[in-house]
Image (cartoon, rainbow, N blue to C red):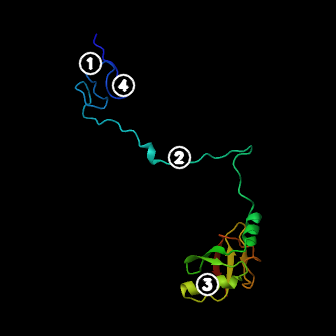
């Protein structure tokens, strides 16, 4: 019975007197399906490894309640980045001061889209949704926080 020695990691046999064994992926005459290409292993290096999620006793940390987020956005003294959806179907993002009245949001949309809206109401897309007709109320008074979405609706006349 003829036995060949397995290859070492360097590709050579352990016995210097024996012939080199071809790699397993080389086509041999004993293959039944010689025309099939060798299977390719997926390149795992192209996938990034995500960091581990720290786990506490109750699982991962939940986001702060909405009231805390609002208080933080007013206390930092910065601007509020708001997404505004206009009645014409267009939308835009713009920074506003927390002390700006809702009228400034409407005026910004009018300038952006080159139209006059007149009487409007402005609603938040938070849950629950809040709608405001008094455009002299400030964003802070209306409870609008950073990264909110506001929709402008034409008033029914």
3 or 1: tag closer to the N-terminus:
1
Residue located at (72% from left, 84% from top): 135
3 or 4: tag closer to the N-terminus:
4
Residue 8 is tagged as: 4
Q: Is residue 103 visible?
A: yes
Q: Nearer the viewer, residue 134 or 35?
A: 35
Identify the residue position indicated by label 3 in the image.
Answer: 108
Identify the residue position indicated by label 2 in the image.
Answer: 49
Dot 3 falls on a residue whose secondary structure is: helix
Quadrant occupied by the N terminus: top left
Q: Is residue 155 visible?
A: no
Nearer mark to the viewer, of 2 and 1: 1
Asked if the residue at tag 4 contacts the one at tag 1, i.e. Cβ–Cβ closer than 8 Å, the answer is: no
Q: Nearer the viewer, residue 103 or 55?
A: 55
Relative to 14, is 45 above or below?
Answer: below
Left or right: residue 14 versus residue 135 is: left
């Amino acid at each position: 019975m003829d036995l060949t020695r397995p290859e070492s990691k360097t590709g050579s046999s352990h016995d210097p007197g024996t012939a080199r064994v071809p790699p397993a992926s080389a086509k041999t005459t004993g293959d039944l399906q010689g025309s099939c290409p060798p299977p390719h292993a997926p390149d795992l290096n192209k996938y990034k490894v995500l960091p581990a999620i720290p786990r506490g006793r109750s699982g991962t940390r939940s986001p702060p309640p909405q009231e805390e987020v609002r208080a933080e956005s007013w206390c930092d003294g910065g601007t509020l980045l708001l997404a505004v959806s206009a009645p014409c179907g267009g939308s835009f993002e713009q920074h506003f001061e927390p002390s700006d009245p809702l009228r400034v949001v409407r005026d910004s949309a009018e300038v952006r889209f080159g139209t006059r809206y007149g009487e409007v109401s402005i609603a938040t897309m938070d849950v629950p949704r809040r709608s405001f007709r008094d455009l002299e109320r400030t964003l802070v008074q209306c409870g609008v926080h950073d990264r909110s979405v506001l929709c402008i609706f034409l008033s029914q006349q």
